Amino acid sequence: MDDVFRALADASRRALLDGLNRDNGQTLRELCAGLDMTRQSVSKHLAILEEAGLVTTVRRGREKLHYLNAAPISDIAERWISRYERRRVDALADLRKALEATPMSRPEFVYTAYIRTTPERLWQGLTDPAFTRQYWATAIESDWTPGAAMTWVVRDDTRIADPEQVVLEAEPYTRLSYAWHTFTDEWAKAYDVDEDRRARWAGEPRSRVTFTIEPKGDHVKLTVVHDGFDEGSEILAGVSQGWPEVISGLKTLLETGAPLTEA
C-alpha cells in the first residue's frame, strides 16, 4: 500500500483523481485542459497513479482513456479495517463508496485488480463453473470458444440460456469477452425482481464484459471492462456496484483458497 499512500500524498495527483471522479474516462488532452500543469507533468502524475492502481487505462482506437479505480481503496478498507478506530474506518469506507459509485460520463464500467496468482489460475477462476460458484454464486457453462453458447446457472439453480448469449473472444490466459446474460422471467423470479424492472432491463441493448489478463511479477493484473450500454442505463448502475464485490471475492479465493465470507 505504500505506492497508494505516496500517490495520494501529492496535491496535483489528488486533483487528477478529483477530475476523474467528476468525469471518468478522460483522455490525456481532456485532463490537461482542466489543470494548470504541462502535458508532461500530467503524464508523469498519471503514470504514478496507474502504478499505484488508482487509475486504470483502456485503449479506444487511437485514444487512451483514464478511469478512476476503486480497488486499492477497497483493499485498505477491507484488509486494514481492524487497525483503525471506527471514525477512520468510516472515512475509508465512505471514500471507497464514493469511488465505486463514480458517475460514468461514458456508458461503461472499468475496474482493475492486482491478484497474487498466475494467468492460468485466474483463467480457471473466470471459466470453471465449480470455481465461480464459490465466489459469485453463479456458474457459466460453455466450451469457451468464440461463438460458443453460454448457459448461466444462478440462484436456486435457475438456468438462463439464449441464442445471443455467447462467447465473443477467448484467448486463454490473456483475454475473455462474452455477452451479458438475458433478463428472463426465471432470472427475475430467482432474484425477486419485479416485472417492471425486469422489462426495463430486458429492453436495454445487450451489453458485454471483457477481462484482460496481464502478468505483473508475482501478480496478475485483471482489467474488467463492461460496456455496450446506452446513456442512463439502469443495468450499468447495477453492475457498477456488483463487479467490485465479485472481483474482491475472486481475489480472496485465489489468494487464500477460501471464499470471502470464510476468509
Image (tube, rainbow, N blue to C red):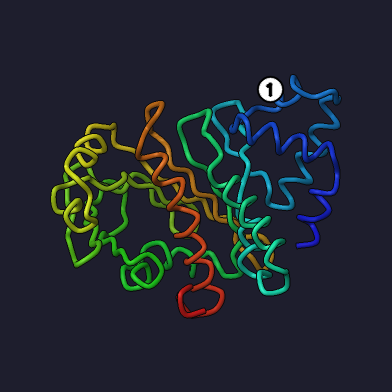
Q: Name which residue type carries label 1.
A: Glu
Residue 218 % position (x, y): 66, 69
Q: Quadrant of the N terminus?
A: bottom right
Farthest-out residue, left: 185
Query: What is the secondary structure assignment of the residue under circle 1?
Result: helix
Residue in view at x 39 percent, y 51 percent = 170
Q: Residue at x 13, y 48 (%)?
A: 185
* In-image side of 165 versus 177 (left or right): left
153 versus 228 height, above or below: below
Residue indicated by mark 1: 30
Is disc 1 surrounded by few (<14), some (14 to 19) or many (20+) residues within 10 Å? few
The percent position of residue 121, horizontal first and vertical second, equals: 49, 70
The quarter of the displayed image where residue 117 is located: bottom right
Question: Which residue is at a point 22% across and 45% down the rendered structure image?
Answer: 182
Number of marks:
1
Q: Position of residue 65 (x, y in %)?
A: 61, 32
Residue at the spot 63% in from the left edge and 36% down from the top edge: 21
Residue 21 to residue 69: above or below: above
Q: Residue furthest top?
A: 33
- In this picture, residue 234 sits left or right of residue 60: left
41 or 260: which is nearer to us?
260
- The image shows residue 63 at horizontal and vertical percentages of 61, 27
